[in-house]
Image: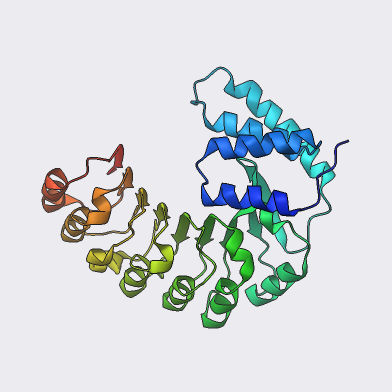
Amino acid sequence: MSDVLPISDEMRGFLLSIKQEPEDDTLRLIFADWLEERGDPRGALMRAQVESDSLSEYDSRLGPLQQTIRQHKREVESALSESPSWLELFDWQRGLLSIQIKRLASLPMRIQQMGRSDWPWEWTDRIQLNGFELNRHSSERFFQSPMLAHLNGLHFSRNRFGHDATKALTSSPHLKNLTELTILDPEMTSQAFELLVSAEALSQLKTLDLTNSAESMLQEQDALDLPSLESLRLIRLGANSSELAGLVQTPTFSRLICAMLGGNNLGDEGMVALAQAEHSRLQYLNLV
């Protein structure tokens, strides 16, 4: 059975480069070579997942490749130490770890446990929090945690993500690699939205998903100012035609590659504004 290598300065360098350029397949494949040459099973897993990610769902090679990925996952997981008590579940995506934090404790307690563990944070790419109480204290503790500096993605669902959590997020000094942010929470207010979408700390964000957030959120659509944003999901907000018309005329919307606005009342005003707006980069639009 192959063993996973201990973390080293050279490995840290590879992982940091990958997280700074998360869409660069070449970096991952070079790192996969490096790992395989040293007998680390994570190299074969990363290579297979990068290859799988490049195939269409109709490609005949996808099925056998997914079986290979499952086999590589078992090999890697058998070589890793036992999962810590705070971990709900984890998975591998393009060779890096995506984790979900177990809920059966307060978030500050979980943060303390995570900080004391020997979890491979350098290998961790995404964290998901579901059902925690993100009040002022817990939000500040979480977003000031240095472990966030390793992440490309954060996913929040049903955490009462209001103004305090948004303020703590946008004030964090540890999000320079964050490119994906999902907040699925009806407590996201228009004031929190304004703070979120104009935050300098999130200027590198490429994907933002605020599905099922508060109906009044898009009252501040003019504040949308995320220069790197490529994908925006604002599904089932109950936004009205005037709010959506304002949204599609923002400079940020004009730079999008993917926009998903289903479950809102686009109406005549919104449709006219969408038809007249500049969106030459847009490749996928969902209004249903």
Question: Which residue: 36% across, 53% down?
Answer: 228
Q: Nearer the viewer, residue 102 or 127?
A: 127
Left or right: 153 as drawn, with respect to 106 = left
Q: Image point 26% across, 67% down: which residue?
A: 223
Extreme front residue here? Answer: 10
Camera-side residue of 207 and 38: 38
Q: Residue at the location (58% across, 29% down)?
A: 51
- Asked if one can make out residue 98 in the rendered structure from this viewpoint, the answer is no
Out of 216 and 66, give the one closest to the viewer.
66
Relative to 136, is 5 on the left or the right? Answer: right
Residue 279's quadrant in the figure?
top left
Q: Position of residue 227 (x, y in %)?
A: 32, 56
Q: Quadrant of residue 147?
A: bottom right
Asked if residue 269 shows in the view, the reply is yes
- Image x and y of residue 169, in percent: 48, 71
In the current view of this chain or complex, which residue is farthest to the top? 60
Assign the N terminus to one quadrant of the image. top right
Whole-percent x and y of residue 17?
58, 49
Position of 260 relative to 62 (above/below):
below
Residue at x 34%, y 65% (from the top left corner): 197
**How many discs appear?**
0
